[in-house]
């Protein structure tokens, strides 16, 4: 089981939605998709997307809020990976962190283009 996070934005094309179906990849934030295993805390997704989990699945979150939360989120990613997987390879850890960074960058870009925050959807 896992936590799947999707970014939705105004005028998102079917091709952009389809690109988010990555086979449960943990490194496709650049498409607006994040994946986190549901097997132990801390959950970086729960911190970054607090409103989504408070509202049971979906919320508009301004990109500025995501950017402010990103440093702590990246700390949680590292804590989690080390706690759950003991032997964490730096390269893989960096790829996962980059995915979170890319997700926030995409939300910033889409908010700038559409003048609306992305809707963040969680499936878990």
Image: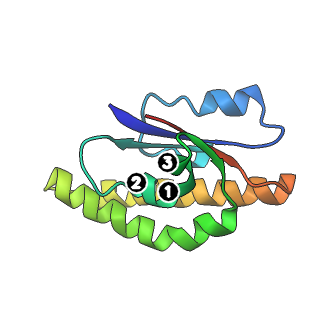
Which residue, given by chain and number where applicable, does mark 1 sit on? 100
The picture places residue 62, in percent across and down from the top left corner, at: 70, 61
Disc sitting over residue 124 in the figure: none
In the shown orientation, is residue 48 left or right of residue 12? left
Residue at (24, 42) in percent of width and height:
39
CA–CA distance in space, label 1 to label 2? 7 Å
Colour scheme of this structure image?
rainbow
CA–CA distance in space, label 3 to label 2? 21 Å
Is residue 89 visible in this depiction of the protein?
no
Q: Secondary structure at mark 1?
A: helix
Which residue, given by chain and number where applicable, does mark 2 sit on? 96
- Direction front: furthest residue: 55
Task: Tell me which label, 3 or 1, sits earlier in the chain.
Answer: 3
Quadrant (top left/top right/bottom left/bottom right) for the N terminus: top left
Q: CB under 8 Å between callouts 1 and 2?
A: yes
Is residue 18 visible in this depiction of the protein?
yes
Which residue, given by chain and number where applicable, does mark 3 sit on? 53
Q: Is residue 69 above or below residue 33?
A: below
CA–CA distance in space, label 3 to label 1? 17 Å
The picture places residue 48, in percent across and down from the top left corner, at: 50, 59
Closer to viewer: mark 3 or mark 2: 3
């Amino acid at each position: 089981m896992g936590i799947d996070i999707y970014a939705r934005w105004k005028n998102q094309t079917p091709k952009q939605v389809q690109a988010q179906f990555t086979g449960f990849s943990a490194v496709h934030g650049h498409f607006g998709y994040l994946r986190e295993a549901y097997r132990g805390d801390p959950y970086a997704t729960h911190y970054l997307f607090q409103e989504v989990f408070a509202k049971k699945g979906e919320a508009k979150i301004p990109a500025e809020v995501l950017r402010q939360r990103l440093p702590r989120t990246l700390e949680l990613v590292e804590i989690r990976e080390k706690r759950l997987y003991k032997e964490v390879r730096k390269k893989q850890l960096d790829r996962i962190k980059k995915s979170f960074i890319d997700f926030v960058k995409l939300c910033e870009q889409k908010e700038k283009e559409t003048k609306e925050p992305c809707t963040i959807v969680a499936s878990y």
